[in-house]
Amino acid sequence: MTSLKIRTFIRSCRLRCTAAKRTGALRSLTVSNGDRKQVRSDNDHCVSVVQSRDREGYLCGLLMPSSARNEYFALRAFNAELAFIKDSSERRRYREGDDAVSSVGLQLRMQWWREALDEIFSKQNENFSSGKSYGKNPVVRALERAVRKSELTRRFLERMLDAREADLHIQQMKTIDNTIMYAEDSCSSLLYLLLECCNVRDDAADEVASNVGVAWGLVTAIRSAPYRAINKEMSIPSDVLTKPITADYLLARQDPDYQPNDTNEKNLREAVQHMAYLAAKHLSRATETQFDVPKSGRPVLLAAVPVVHYLMRLKEAEYNIFDPRLQPDESKLVIMAMLGRAWLTGRF
């Protein structure tokens, strides 16, 4: 079944029970809005999480319509929390050398979020904050309000969680297709949900979001390679490398005094170039059809702007992922200008 058919099937299933849930959802939303101080505090917390862990996502969020901005930051904070599970646990694992303890910790934290989703979707007519410990977490509370207000599709949230959980123990993807599938499940699913926050639910818009999400995921894999090497991981899939390259090589390569191996260097750059080509191909498809997305949903596509910018800089750096020009601090003002232009023109 194609990705488009899967999304259509997921939405058709949920629409059958939407009418029955609508009354309860609105009642739940009214109760939640009663405590305005807590709502404001939860929203501020989500913004803070995104600002500290996903700077580009934070900048995009500032340009979202006010009617969807709180839901945007709730979903982005949820995504950041899931990503942080592996990052924080992996750092602790290699520092302490206790694989078993770390593995249990990873699974427990993922299970906590899975149970939080169950709690969110089971609280149809109750005050969510009065529930179990999940209702005491500001990101969970904000996510619950987003689910109620925008009637978000549960399966997309679960796909994000499933993808992150499956990635917990993967040191390196075997194929580029695996990487693309992971990007679709994690990044594209997030964009589908953000479109729903803007009241956009149609296949044409989803197709654009799918291509943007895959490009975003591929570029994230490229950008994160030096960082993930610290955790003994290789974010470049093995089938695009003509010869295996270890994370230790990427780690050593970050030393300014290290003399790179010509064979490894050529191999790595060719692999990165191939991934960048695929990302650009998906972006090109999204660019051609971006106006199929209703105007109200186009701010969601601003996620493509940092991807476009990075691919441009990567090409200038001749696909050397260690080039100083690729550092985030070197391009912040340029990205802000590109985001502003894309927001004004409606074209990324």
Image (spheres, helix red, strand yellow):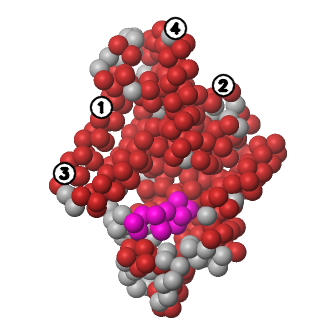
**Measured Cα–Cα span from mark 3 to mark 1:** 21 Å
What residue appears at the point 59 percent right and 47 percent down from the top-left corner? 55
Q: On screen, 47 above or below 287?
A: above
Q: Which mark is residue 44?
A: none
Element on which disc 2 rests: helix
Q: Amino acid at mark 1?
A: Glu
- The percent coordinates of residue 1 (x first, y second) are 43, 52
Q: Is residue 221 magenta?
A: yes
Residue 11 shows in this picture:
no
Residue position marked by numbered label 3 in the rendering: 101
* First in sequence: mark 1 vs mark 2: 2
Residue position marked by numbered label 1 in the rendering: 115
* First in sequence: mark 2 vs mark 3: 2
Q: Nearer the viewer, mark 4 or mark 3?
A: 3
Q: Amino acid at mark 4?
A: Gly
**Measured Cα–Cα span from mark 2 to mark 3:** 43 Å
The magenta stretch is: 218-230
